[in-house]
Image: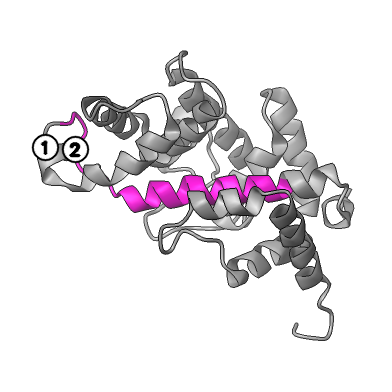
Amino acid sequence: MPGDDDSLVERARSFFRLIRENGQLAAIQERYSEPGNDLDRVGMFQFMKQVRERLPPLIPLFQEVAAAYDLDWRLLAAIGYQESHWDPKAISSTGVHGLMMLTQAAADDLGISDRQDTEASVLGGARYFLRNKRRIPTEITEPDRTWMALAAYNMGMGHLEDVRVITQKRGEDPDSWDYVRNNLELLTQESWYRDTRYGYARDFETRQFVDNVRDYYEMLVWMDTREHPLLVAGL
């Protein structure tokens, strides 16, 4: 409920002061200079609100699953927030369900019978992310490997490979996420996608997905490394 408590806003301001001073904010602004790609004040307030209200009881589950699959729990949590705002009962208009928003086909393939079961959804999301990451060519190193795996999580490995082929045809580095990200829009142009294996794809969704997950991940890392009270409240 609205009130006089502005502690979340003050924490957000403290976060921005820190990243402004250490140069991270400038890097983020440069990376997301395209209109519509910045995490605005409303988005930040909503994120901090859900960090307080929904995330704490989920942290042990994210940590347990991440440890089992050698992943960073904060990355899993960032994916979960981007997908559902940490709502285990979320359902999209396209029929994806649960905290990690698994499609029915992905759930069936992963052996997940109830997509709205919180533990099953997080397990499924972790396994699906890792499946894509393992298919990324071995010559692609971190952090590009993770960003491309996130893109594949969202758009599918086939479309990602199409963009990498396009990137190479343009004389650019197909192993660099920055180049691949900039060429995603070509999957909306018939002159380019008609010669690809998997055809048209909506580029803006994947760019937004990866950009947002990166932002949320960086914020969770910042909070976690400082033992932020919002992250330990539910433990």
Residue 229 % position (x, y): 89, 56
Q: Where does label 1 land, which residue?
A: 194
Question: Is there any visible trace of residue 146 in the rendered image?
Answer: yes
Question: Residue extending furthest bottom?
Answer: 3
Name the residue nearer the viewer: 93 or 210: 210
Name the residue nearer the viewer: 100 or 14: 14
* Residue range (magenta): 196-220
**Residue contact at pointers 2 and 1, CB within 8 angstroms:** yes
- Residue located at (46% from left, 26% from top): 132
Residue 68 % position (x, y): 71, 24
Tell me if residue 142 comes above or below residue 33 in the rendering.
above
Q: Is residue 207 magenta?
A: yes
Q: Is residue 124 magenta?
A: no
- Residue located at (30% from left, 40% from top): 183
Tell me if residue 163 comes above or below residue 83 in the rendering.
above
Q: Where does label 2 land, which residue?
A: 199
- Residue located at (65% from left, 45% from top): 217
Question: How many numbered marks have been drawn onto this rendered protein structure?
Answer: 2
Question: Is there any visible trace of residue 111 in the rendered image?
Answer: no
Residue 90 % position (x, y): 54, 58
Tag 1 or tag 2, which sits nearer the N-term?
1
* Kind of residue sitting beneath label 1: Arg
Name the residue nearer the viewer: 147 or 124: 147
Secondary structure at badge 1 equals loop
- Dot 1 surroundings within 10 Å: few (below 14), some, or many (20 or more)? few
State the CA–CA distance, disc 2 to disc 1.
6 Å
Numbered circle sitting on residue 213: none
Question: Residue extending furthest top?
Answer: 138
* Kind of residue sitting beneath label 2: Gly
Residue 39 in the figure: left or right of residue 229: left
